[in-house]
Structures are given as C-alpha cells and as structure tokens.
Image: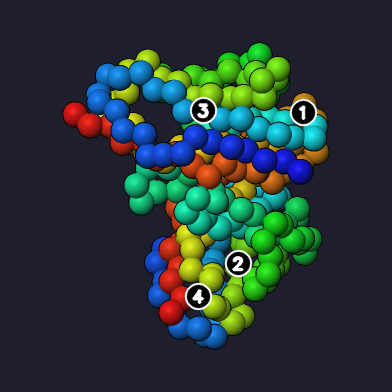
Amino acid sequence: GNSVTQMEGPVTLSEEAFLTINCTYTATGYPSLFWYVQYPGEGLQLLLKATKADDKGSNKGFEATYRKETTSFHLEKGSVQVSDSAVYFCALRDTGRRALTFGSGTRLQVQP
Amino acid sequence: EAQVTQNPRYLITVTGKKLTVTCSQNMNHEYMSWYRQDPGLGLRQIYYSMNVEVTDKGDVPEGYKVSRKEKRNFPLILESPSPNQTSLYFCASLPPGTSGRSYTDTQYFGPGTRLTVL
C-alpha cells in the first residue's frame, strides 16, 4: 500500500536558519506529492505540490523537488521566520485515487 | 469566498450520545471526504463521497456513518460515540480534474472539529 514517512519533530530553529523537513514515500502508481501546513488552531492549507518526477513545487519561500529515484519530497526554506511555526504534513495522491495519504506531521518551532 | 465550513468547531460529549458534525462547501465540488487527525498518525480518511448518494469507506470507517443527500453537504454521524473517537476531524472537498487528470488537483479543507468523548 501507499505510505508517507516524515522526520520526527519537533524541529526547533532560530529565525533566519535553513530548514529541511525530510519526506519519503512508497506508492504503487505515479503519485502527485503535496506539502500541507497547519497553523495553530486552523485547518490544513496546501503549501506546494508537484505532479511528476523532477517537478519543483514552491510557495512562500518553501521549495520541494519530486525525486523519483530516491522516492523523496523534502521541504526546504532558506530563511525561516517566526510566522512559519506550524505543523507540516507531507502527502501523496496515487494514480486514479482521490484520497490523500498523509505523513504523521512535523512540528516546526521558530524562535526569535 | 470559496470555502469548506464545519460545525461545531469544538464538542465535548459523553459515550453513547449520538452526534452529527456538519460539513458544507460552496464550490460545487462533487468529491467530499472526512479525515481524522491523531498525534503521530497524521490524517486518515474515514469516508468519502464521489457524488450525491454515492459514499464509500475510507481507511478507518468503523463507528462512523455519512450521508450525501445534497452536493454541498456531507455530514459525519457518530451513532454511539466512544472515547477512542476523541480526535480532530477535517472535512475536505476536491474539484474535478483538468485535462482529465483529476488526481493532480488540490483538496480544500475545513477548519476542523475537535471532538472529545468522555
């Protein structure tokens, strides 16, 4: 079956530090890959997505590249801000399915 | 404004007392679904609906029911809630695909309902 594995959190960084949150996946087809963000007390918002191998999704300074050879979709940001503090979920949607398979989430805490 | 709404946002109840969490979307989406979020497990799909009167089980359907009588509404029903259903619940809807590739599209999530069953 499909699965998504994320690094354990929480990740605590100082403002302007470089961020990487690792995500690897297993899928039976050719999935689309997503990063969702959940700010405190809110629902999930799509942060970025990539639909095929070597695609790079980007939004709000965050980037992730769809690496089929390593089945990975790591989230990166060059300089985090306190406002980036949230829980980040990696997810996939496999070919022909509409349901998302989520990772367990990684909490990011950015300190001033 | 395009949105998915859920009510209530917070609910504390007791074991065995039937409850309904409502979900409504104003985007005319055909596909809607319910997820629950638990620590360390991410989000898991409970039920989904491809269209009016078409529903099916997700990964964790036990103890839940749904109905889809209208396209915009997709209520989640707990006939006899138990403490292991204490969780954060999200409703989501999905627009139809473009270029025939529906699986590339973005799901829209509601704000969540935090349920505590005592």
Q: Does residue B36 appear anywhere in the picture?
A: yes
Q: Which mark is residue B75?
A: 2
Q: Tell me the kind of residue under disc 4.
A: Pro
Q: Chain of mark 4?
A: B
Q: Earlier in the sequence, mark 4 or mark 2?
A: 2
Q: Chain of mark 2?
A: B
Local crowd size for mark 4, using a 10 Å CA cut-off: few (<14), some (14–19), many (≥20): some
Q: Tell me the kind of residue under disc 2.
A: Pro
Q: Check if mark 4 and mark 2 are on a common chain.
A: yes
**Left or right: B15, with B50 as reference point:** left
Q: Nearer the viewer, residue B6 or B10?
A: B10
Secondary structure under the numbered disc 1 in the rendered image: loop
Counting from the top left corner in percent of width and height, residue A59 is at 46, 22
The quadrant holding residue B55 is bottom right
Residue at position x 54%, y 48% in the image: B42
Q: Which mark is residue A30?
A: 1
Q: Nearer the viewer, mark 4 or mark 2?
A: 4
Q: Nearer the viewer, mark 4 or mark 1?
A: 4
In the rendered view, tell whether residue B102 sits above or below residue A63: below
Q: Earlier in the sequence, mark 3 or mark 1?
A: 3
Q: Tell me the kind of residue under disc 1.
A: Tyr
